[in-house]
Image (cartoon, rainbow, N blue to C red):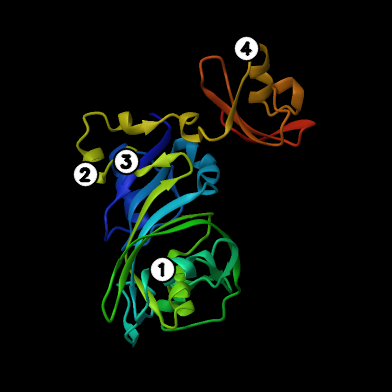
Amino acid sequence: MAEGFLLVDKAGGWTSHDVVAKCRGIFGERRIGHAGTLDPMATGLLVLGVGRATRLLRYVQEGVKQYVARVGFGIATDTLDADGAILEREPMDFAPEELTAAATRFLGTISQVPPMVSAVKVGGRRLYELAREGIEVERKPRTVEIHEIDVLDVTPGPYPEAEIAVKCGSGTYIRTLADDLAQTLGGRAHLTALRRTAIGPHDVNRARTIEEISVLEDPTAAILGMSDGLEDLGALVVDQETVSGVSNGVVFAAAALGAGDPGSYRVVDEEGTLLAVYASDGRRAKPEVVVA
């Protein structure tokens, strides 16, 4: 059984769990998980870990994410997206340059309040579970990082729509960002469409739909090797003598592994097979995950 990462172009209407469940059937493998939930309305890149690669998903999930979102201004919904019930409807009037200027206020490190439909736990329960019961609770703001917001298009009218591209850190809620943008312009907004186009080094153009994967003669051909799936981590190639130590989780002097700079590294053998991920503080290199 091949192990590694699977890049899926998720269709609208599927939950992330639906995709995982379908792939468990396709591959006959229970050990499948995903890096970063996509809501049912959203489409685009969902990275799955297959087999031992499930232990490495956190390195993917921590990567920078890119989205293209369609924002409907003047209308607020209880889920902040098109699947929710309308709460407010008030026409808005702004120029495209005003939206561009407003977007600059959200660059850098900002605070966001998680939406009630998120998977964040409060009191041991997921917020979306409480939302389904009509319960709304107070949520603590969370710090997120917004690297870029580009306004791609604005369709004028009493209820303008805009297409924006967002590059952000892990944990960012695009639906919340859209509504916060609208509030700086004096109104409210919700997402009418959302597509994730990249996570870290992985691009949706390299992904396959579930339908495409399911008709492959050998579905494992779609799986990226574990080392290839972590290509944004520096690679440390070790000789055969060192392989045993790495496989047993030995702590090395950073210089001995070539990990002089602080950070996480994928450690591979001379054939390129992933053995482990090690973290270096510049002096010592310690194992974080050993897969050999």
Tag of residue 205: 3
Quarter assignment of residue 139: bottom right
Do the residues under discs 2 and 3 have CB atoms within 8 angstroms?
A: no
Residue at the (33%, 67%) spot, across then down: 162
Q: Is residue 49 above or below residue 260?
A: below
Q: Nearer the viewer, mark 2 or mark 3?
A: 3
Q: Could you tell which of marks 2 and 3 lies nearer the N-terminus?
A: 3
Q: Nearer the viewer, mark 4 or mark 3?
A: 3
Q: Could you tell which of marks 2 and 1 lies nearer the N-terminus?
A: 1
Tag of residue 211: 2
Q: Secondary structure at mark 3?
A: helix
Q: Secondary structure at mark 4?
A: helix
Q: How many marks?
A: 4
Q: Find residue 281 and report its horizontal and vertical position in percent.
A: 75, 37
| Mark 2 residue type | Glu
Q: Could you tell which of marks 1 and 4 lies nearer the N-terminus?
A: 1
Residue at the (43%, 32%) spot, across then down: 3
Q: Disc 1 marks which residue?
A: 97
Q: Find residue 110 and report its horizontal and vertical position in percent.
A: 59, 66
Q: Quadrant of the C terminus?
A: top right
Q: Find residue 216 and report its horizontal and vertical position in percent.
A: 22, 33
Q: Could you tell which of marks 4 and 3 lies nearer the N-terminus?
A: 3
Q: Disc 4 marks which residue?
A: 240
Q: Quadrant of the N terminus?
A: top left
> Of 220 and 228, which appears nearest the observer?
228
Quarter assignment of residue 11: bottom left
Q: Nearer the viewer, mark 1 or mark 4?
A: 1
Q: Is residue 99 above or below residue 65?
A: below
| Mark 3 residue type | Asn
